[in-house]
Amino acid sequence: MPNPLRVLDAARRVVDEINELLAHSGARLLYEDDIRDAAESITANIREAYGRREGAERNQFFRYARGSAEETDEHTRPNFRIRRIDATRYWRIHNRLAAIVKMLNSLMNNECGSAAMSALPSALLSVVTSAVLAVPLHQR
């Protein structure tokens, strides 16, 4: 079973990278405060999500975290374009943020699926599962 808290570890790496970047960048970055706030919001919302019930309530905080990851990425891009962030660092941050977004999407999809499936009576669940498994993956 995959570890759902891997997304929190990845988000913490982004926060550490952003804080190091802000502390040691030669020139002041554009949107500096926004970058810091958005990056820290990713981890805060993931932690908040795991304090909530499974399903819609938890997914709402995963969506907030996803939005913060996208905001962090959007604010680092112009700094890369004007060469205030070097290419190696920018692409490392960008790729981690893209992975975090994918992980959050996966967690939300699993949450929706597990919440919907747990509401079905077990007899119906076995019929639905059998029907889904009978359909080839490329047709789903």
Image (cartoon, helix red, strand yellow):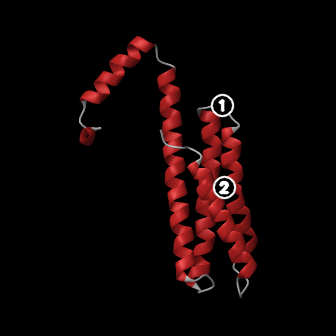
Mark 1 Cα-neighbour bin, 10 Å: few <14, some 14–19, many ≥20? few
Residue 10 lies, in percent from the top left, at 59, 57
> Could one spot residue 31 in this view of the protein?
no
Q: Choose top left, top right, bottom left or bottom right for residue 61.
A: top right
Residue in view at x 58 percent, y 51 percent? 7
Asked if 61 appears above or below 117 in the picture, the reply is below
Q: Give whichever of 1, 98 is nearer the camera.
A: 1
Q: Amino acid at mark 2?
A: Ile
| Disc number for residue 95 | none
Q: Does 91 sit left or right of 45 as displayed?
A: left
Viewed as shown, does residue 80 lie left or right of 35? left
Residue tagged by mark 2?
42
Circle 1: element type: loop
Assess disc 2: are there few (<14), some (14-19) or many (≥20) residues with their C-alpha within 10 Å of its C-alpha: many
Lower position in the chain sequence, tag 2 or tag 1: 2
Q: Residue at x 50, y 29 (%)?
A: 114
The quadrant holding residue 12 is bottom right
Q: Position of residue 40 (x, y in %)?
A: 71, 59
- CB atoms of marks 2 and 1 within 8 Å: no
Q: Nearer the viewer, residue 31 or 136?
A: 136
Q: Position of residue 94 (x, y in %)?
A: 54, 68
- Amino acid type at circle 1 is Arg
Find residue 3 and report its horizontal and vertical position in percent. 54, 44
Q: Visible in this render: residue 100?
A: yes
Please identify the quadrant where the C terminus is shown.
top left
Q: CA distance from mark 2 to mark 1?
A: 19 Å
Placement of 64 over or under 94, stated as above or below:
above
Residue at 35 percent of width and 21 percent of height: 128
Q: Residue at 70% across / 80% down in the picture?
A: 29
Provide the residue designation for mark 1.
Answer: 53
